[in-house]
Amino acid sequence: QVQLVESGGGLVQAGGSLRLSCAASGRTFTSYAMGWFRQAPGKEREFVAAISRSGIGTYYEDSVKGRFTISRDNAKNTVYLQMNSLKPEDTAVYYCAADRRSDGGVVTTEDLYDYWGQGTQVTVSS
């Protein structure tokens, strides 16, 4: 089992940047495909970005392409989400997730993820 702890959220003005981090416990971090999801008030949780076990493969939800970058440091057991040009509609609780059954590709489906962090709040003011 792996435990995930997100950090880096906060309040930022529109056009600003934040970098979220997700630290994973355990010694098998490279076995997990990782993803970021978000949930805005009154809305369902949605996919944001995913990265393969190796870090080579990445995938983004259309509204964040070109603004967000997912990366991972397997030596530090950490996955990151660099968020630039933030918009008020990016306001949400952001969650990282780990999929232990990945065959090496990216995973975009929420139901396929096995472990979740507690979330970190991102608020973008206009």
Image: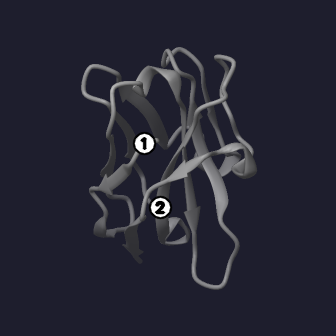
Question: Which residue has dot 2 on it?
Answer: 94
Work out whether residue 49 can be spotted: yes
Sequence-first tag of 2 and 1: 1
Tag of residue 2: 1
Q: Residue at x 44, y 20 (%)?
A: 30
Q: In the rendering, at what x and y percent does residue 27 appear?
A: 33, 26
Q: At numbered mark 2, what does the secondary structure look like: helix, strand or loop?
A: strand
Q: Tell me which amino acid carries mark 1.
A: Val
Image height of 48 relative to 88, above or below: above
Q: In the rendering, at what x and y percent does residue 11 appear?
A: 29, 72
2 and 1 marks in contact (CB < 8 Å):
no
Q: Residue furthest front?
A: 1
Q: Residue at x 39, y 49 (%)?
A: 4
Q: Quadrant of residue 13?
A: bottom left
- Dot 2 alpha-carbon crowd within 10 angstroms: few under 14, some 14 to 19, many 20 or more: many
Of residues 62 and 45, the one drawn nearer to the viewer in this rendering? 45
Q: Quadrant of residue 124?
A: bottom left
Q: At numbered mark 1, what does the secondary structure look like: helix, strand or loop?
A: loop
